[in-house]
């Protein structure tokens, strides 16, 4: 029975929103995020001559909440209007310049054509001019399965392996190894459990994660790991050394913010 006043409360029907503020001493000038990112890539020694620029488009961007006790991260991602790389843009490249091409497992309609083009190049190239092709299966939603039977080095991310029912890197490496080319290598990183790999000889390798002491920022550990693996394989190190190097560099990265000074 309604009784005005008394101990009755006010009910608010809606949802709760957490606002996180980025406080800057001046508002960013238009396009300075682009120049900042490109400057930093140059500084890290990444050649950017073939970056496709889209006037008036913004990078996808992420706001990341890091738990300093565990290094865990929560990512709020905003994918704006930057178009994906197309096969016709890729065709502008002179493949003679490259010894290794790594593909992200996304935009697979275009990327599968890029992989085919590199394979065609390899068919007519001499042994020493052949390009090693690697591909990363990370997000199942992009259906990167085309890589499995085509690439020379298959990176299987934990997330993708779990999507396929694997509960350890060892099981994932065994599972995917039976589906790749005979000459291919499968590599799978598994967070603080380290990483596993299997090359064409079918020998299984495991490396524990390298502890940085205190974990402060695991964002980009997977990409750091992949980059270090590619760098070590380019130096023709044996697979167990390659894995150790990958885990060491990725572990160091987890002990610092960002990527500066990593080797
Ligand atoms: P992603 O960033 O894709 O989630 P992972 O979490 O699988 O990548 O980590 C990739 C590699 O980074 C692991 O194989 C491991 O060597 C290293 N790594 C990740 N988390 C840690 C951690 N907490 N401590 C030490 N090394 C880690």
Image (tube, rainbow, N blue to C red):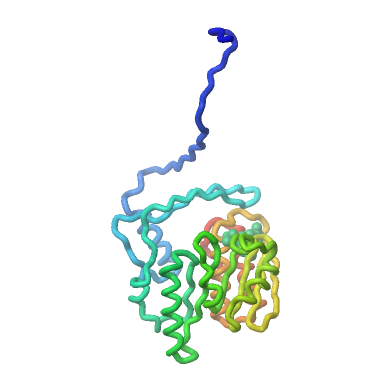
Quick check: 20 above or below 179?
above
Say above or below: 27 vs 110.
above
Quadrant that contains the C terminus: bottom right
Can residue 57 be seen in this snapshot? yes
Q: Position of residue 209 (x, y in %)?
A: 68, 64
What residue sits 45% from the left and 88% below the top?
123
Tell me what residue is drawn at x 47 percent, y 86 percent.
130
Q: 126 above or below 110?
A: below
Can you tell me which quadrant of the image ligand 1 is in?
A: bottom right
Residue 16 image offset from top left, x and y in percent: 52, 33
Asked if residue 252 can be seen in this view, the reply is no
| 56 or 104, nearer to the observer | 104
Expressed as whole percent of the image width and height from the top left, the position of residue 66 reads 57, 49
Residue at the image point whose x is 63% and y is 72% from the top: 176
In which quadrant of the rendered view does residue 181 lie? bottom right
Residue 129 x %, y %: 46, 88
Report whether 10 appears left or right of 202.
left
Q: Nearer the viewer, residue 10 or 62?
A: 10
233 sits left or right of 46 in the view: right
Direction front: furthest residue = 1
Q: Which quadrant would residue 187 be assigned to in this image?
A: bottom right
Left or right, 167 with reference to 87: right
List the single residue furthest toward the left.
Answer: 55
Q: Quadrant of residue 169?
A: bottom right
In this rendering, the count of numbered labels is 0
Q: Toward the viewer: 21 or 145?
A: 145
Q: What residue lies at 59% left-to-right and 64% top-to-bottom? A: 157
Kindly give the residue lying farthest to the bottom in the view shown. 126
| Quarter of the picture holding the N terminus | top right
Residue 29 or 196: which is nearer the viewer? Answer: 196
């Amino acid at each position: 029975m309604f009784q005005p006043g008394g101990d009755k409360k006010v009910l608010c029907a809606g949802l709760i929103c957490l606002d996180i503020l980025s406080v800057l001493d001046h508002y960013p000038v238009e396009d300075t995020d682009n120049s900042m990112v490109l400057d930093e890539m140059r500084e890290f020694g990444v050649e950017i001559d073939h970056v496709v620029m889209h006037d008036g488009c913004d990078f996808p961007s992420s706001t990341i909440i890091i738990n300093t006790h565990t290094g865990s991260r929560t990512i709020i991602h905003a994918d704006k209007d930057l178009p994906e790389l197309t096969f016709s843009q890729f065709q502008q490249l002179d493949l003679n310049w490259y010894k290794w091409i790594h593909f992200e497992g996304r935009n697979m309609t275009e990327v599968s054509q890029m992989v085919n083009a590199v394979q065609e190049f390899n068919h007519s190239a001499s042994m020493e001019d052949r390009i090693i092709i690697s591909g990363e299966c990370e997000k199942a939603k992009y259906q990167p399965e085309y890589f499995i039977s085509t690439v020379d080095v298959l990176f299987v991310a934990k997330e993708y392996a779990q999507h396929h029912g694997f509960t350890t890197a060892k099981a994932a490496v065994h599972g995917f190894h039976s589906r790749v080319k005979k000459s291919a290598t499968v590599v799978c990183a598994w967070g603080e459990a380290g990483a596993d790999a299997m090359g064409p000889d079918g020998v299984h390798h495991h490396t524990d994660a390298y502890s940085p002491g205190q974990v402060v920022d695991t964002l980009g550990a997977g990409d750091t790991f992949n980059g270090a693996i590619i760098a070590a394989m380019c130096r023709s190190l044996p697979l167990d050394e390659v894995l150790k190097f990958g885990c060491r560099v990725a572990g160091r990265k987890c002990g610092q913010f960002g990527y500066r000074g990593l080797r």
